[in-house]
């Protein structure tokens, strides 16, 4: 059985294109495209020997990779969000929440209960468990809180644990 070189290049191209589905690095497909270009040039009798076929394969794969990868990657993989967008939450600023674990001034490690879940919290002052705080913002998944000021009743500073 005599198999033509263009058939071999065609099969290599198809196999590489399908391999992209199993190893999605979005690079293998361009080598598959290079193999298809080589199959076409071999079928058209432009590349008759293995040396010229390997040259066409290498050059066309690299050109396809450089020219098309960025464009096709956004089409097939979608656009990614900026880091700021990826970490933004719909936090209810001003919401009053209970402290469940002591909050040290300026340190992460204290905890509050918000929307039925325990969140890490940070504040500029020491706040004991059982007290209420208002949410001022968030830093990634850490809530930034401040003690709720009560009217008419002066609070004692919390004792350190």
Image (cartoon, rainbow, N blue to C red):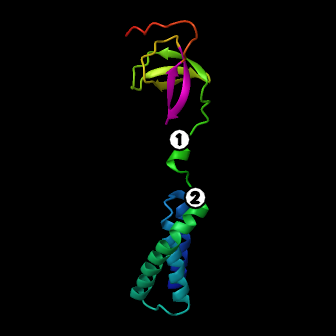
Name the outermost residue toward the front: 152
Mark 2 or mark 1, earlier in chain: 2
Q: Nearer the viewer, residue 35 or 126?
A: 126
Identify the residue at image location x=43%, y=9%. 158
Q: Assess whether residue 140 is covered by the magenta stretch.
A: yes
Q: Nearer the viewer, residue 80 or 155?
A: 155
Residue 16 position within the rendered picture, expressed as x and y whole percent measured from the top left: 51, 68
Position of 160 relative to 83 (above/below): above
The C terminus sits in image quarter? top left
Find disc 1 in the rendering and name its residue: 87
Q: Is residue 2 visible?
A: no
Find disc 2 in the rendering and name its residue: 77
Label 2 residue SS: helix
Magenta-colored segment: predominant secondary structure: strand
Q: Nearer the viewer, residue 21 or 30?
A: 30
Q: Are marks 2 and 1 in contact (CB under 8 Å)?
A: no
Q: Which residues are magenta?
A: 132-147
Label 1 residue SS: loop
Q: Is residue 72 visible?
A: yes
Identify the residue at image location x=54%, y=45%. 86
Q: CA distance from mark 2 to mark 1?
A: 20 Å
Left/right of residue 105 with respect to residue 111 in the rendered view: left
């Amino acid at each position: 059985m005599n198999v033509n070189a263009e058939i071999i290049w065609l099969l290599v191209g198809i196999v590489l294109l399908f391999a992209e589905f199993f190893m999605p690095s979005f690079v293998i497909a361009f080598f598959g495209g290079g193999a298809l270009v080589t199959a076409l040039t071999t079928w058209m009798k432009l590349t008759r020997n293995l040396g010229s076929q390997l040259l066409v394969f290498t050059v066309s794969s690299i050109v396809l990779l450089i020219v098309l990868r960025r464009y096709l990657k956004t089409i097939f993989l979608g656009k990614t969000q900026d880091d700021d967008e990826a970490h933004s939450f719909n936090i209810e600023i001003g919401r009053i929440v209970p402290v469940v674990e002591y909050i040290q001034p300026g340190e992460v490690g204290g905890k509050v209960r918000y929307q039925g879940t325990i969140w890490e919290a940070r504040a500029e002052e020491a706040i004991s468990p059982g007290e209420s705080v208002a949410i001022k913002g968030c830093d990634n998944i850490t809530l930034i809180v401040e003690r709720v000021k009560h009217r008419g009743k002066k609070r004692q500073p919390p004792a350190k644990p």
